[in-house]
Amino acid sequence: MHINKDKIRNFSIISHVDHGKSTLSDRILEITHAVDPRNMRAQYLDSMDIERERGITIKAQNVRVHWKDYILNLIDTPGHVDFGYEVSRSLAACEGVILLVDSTQGIQAQTLANCYLAVDHNLEIIPVLNKIDLPASDVERCKEEIKQTLGIDPNDILSISAKTGQGIEILLDTVIEKIPPPTGDSQVKLQALIFDSYFDQFRGVISSIRVINGEISQNSRLLFMHSKTSHEVEEIGTRNPDPTPVDVLGAGEVGYVIANVRNVSEAPPGETVTDFNAPASNPLGGYKQPQPMVYCGLYPIDGDEFSNLKEALTKLKLNDASVTYEPETSSALGFGFRCGFLGLLHMEIVRERLEREFNLSLIATAPSVNYRIKLTNNKSIQIDNPNDLPSANQVQQIEEPILIATILTPAEYTGTVMELCQLKRGEMIKMDYLSQNRVELKYKIPLGEVVIDFFDSLKSRTKGYASLDYEQSDYQPANLVKVELLINGISVDAFSMIVHKSKAQEYGKKMTEKLRELIPRQLFDVPIQAAIGGKIISRETIKARRKDVLAKCYGGDITRKRKLLEKQKEGKKKMKSIGRVEVPQEAFISALKIDS
């Protein structure tokens, strides 16, 4: 049965993390009676435990609801900057967005970034202030801020409370009134956009799609244009919010398709689907291969779990094609994998999922980024592991990735935020006052400085009020060096780090002091040194455990005591030359803590 396109509205909710996106989705499901009240639960569309606990959306979800003879397709998007590409694909499947702003906090960095994304896609924007039921809500200030920043008339801004349901019905009426119906022609060749996919162990890959032109019917054969694979359709349907099979999905409709695909990488977000027998001439624009930005080594604490980790990563990649991994060995940590992630939150989530869902105990090395190395023979290589850096006499120049970071902060914290950015080698691009007490700062900052503790420092300096959004810019040359840690003269590869020369001393001192506390005392003196090339820049010594060899001497000649002490000294010297220092696992875990 063909649905009248004029009765369809496709929209998305965009906002900063924690501004009430999932709560608004819950209220819309309740008010439109899409879910039986007995089955209703908070964050209904968030399917993963981690999403519920952290209160964030990681996977895009879509649901079809009915309101006053109209079909509304709500596409829920992730809010975090790491998943910006998925957000852009979700927006490509819509004609309009609800821009949700917390009326107690005002506009935040990702609100702005997502709003500009919506403007780039020529979408109708409905500005909405949420949380007006809270005592701290300041509607007038926020309206003024939105007017200053985005040029939106304050009279067009709706005020709602997603928690209590106040104003939601007016919002749904506004969606119908302001967001245009989908364009597209059901009679031309099929073009459909996949905006999200996940792996189901019984049914294979289930893809969320928006049909742009043409139509998909049951049992037709589809061509996936970027991955160049073809698959038979097993089932198509809509989510109401439970999956409901249909015979045909026409132009403008949003639904899901199951086509016997066994790997998410064959149906990634941004993929264009067309009819195998009568293919469209061009795929839809905007497709990108996900590029990892942050890398770290993952090692099982128990070496016997290596095969379990390998299996877990294989299963996880079925669900998340943006994770990359390859085996690597470390003299200190044994066998593990070098993994690439979209960002720090993505890295945390993947690690947490591996530990939880597959019952693994893991050590993660310090996060690093992708460096471009120009060698003296004029060849160029890329490395993401500090231990792959060639020796200094082979390196002509090292280039590091740069971010354009947008920070929104209350005006009173401007000084401390600027100080933090300068500490992290940031270069100011611009500074704007959004209102009397809110400032937008734009900085060029090296990605390597952001991945360790930038976000935590920003939050603690601004009492949690600042927000951060970033996008990758380009590479630029920098004076970088590799700091190695030597324990008893032997390099421990797990602690190697590429840092700026001006910070090498500080990193070396911090790590040697830390390891001195963490490594237990041996029967001989253990030197812990930080070195750049052959030059030692910092040193700490773990003093030997000594047996009191003079305990049996009651008085008597001093020469006898000296003889015993010399004998002990010789023994210690011999021990030091043949002794090996076992660094306990706890020391690695503590020293490699990301927030250290």
Image (tube, rainbow, N blue to C red):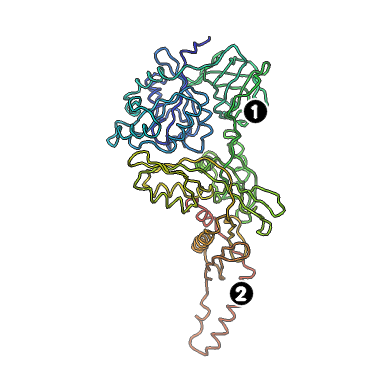
Residue drawn at (48%, 30%) of the image: 77
**Vertical position of residue 426 compared to residue 266: above or below:** below
Give the label, 1 or 2, closer to the camera.
Answer: 1
Residue drawn at (58%, 41%) of the image: 292
Type of residue at label 1? His
Upstream in sequence: badge 1 or badge 2: 1
**Residue 568 or residue 230, whichever sits in front:** 230
Check disc 1 and report the residue beneath it. Answer: 226
**Residue 261 or residue 507, whichever sits in front:** 507
Q: CA distance from mark 1 to mark 2?
A: 65 Å
Check disc 2 and report the residue beneath it. Answer: 573
**Residue 399 or residue 391, whichever sits in front:** 399
On residue 376, the disc is none
**Residue 225 or residue 263, whichever sits in front:** 225
Residue 540 is situated, as x and y percent measured from the top left of the image, at 52, 67
Residue drawn at (40%, 28%) of the image: 41
**Vertical position of residue 49 compared to residue 274: above or below:** below
The answer to whether 443 appears left or right of 315 in the picture is left
Res 359 quadrant in image: top right
How many C-alpha atoms fall within 10 Å of the one at disc 1: few (<14), some, or many (≥20)?
some
Judge whether residue 298 can be spotted in this image: no
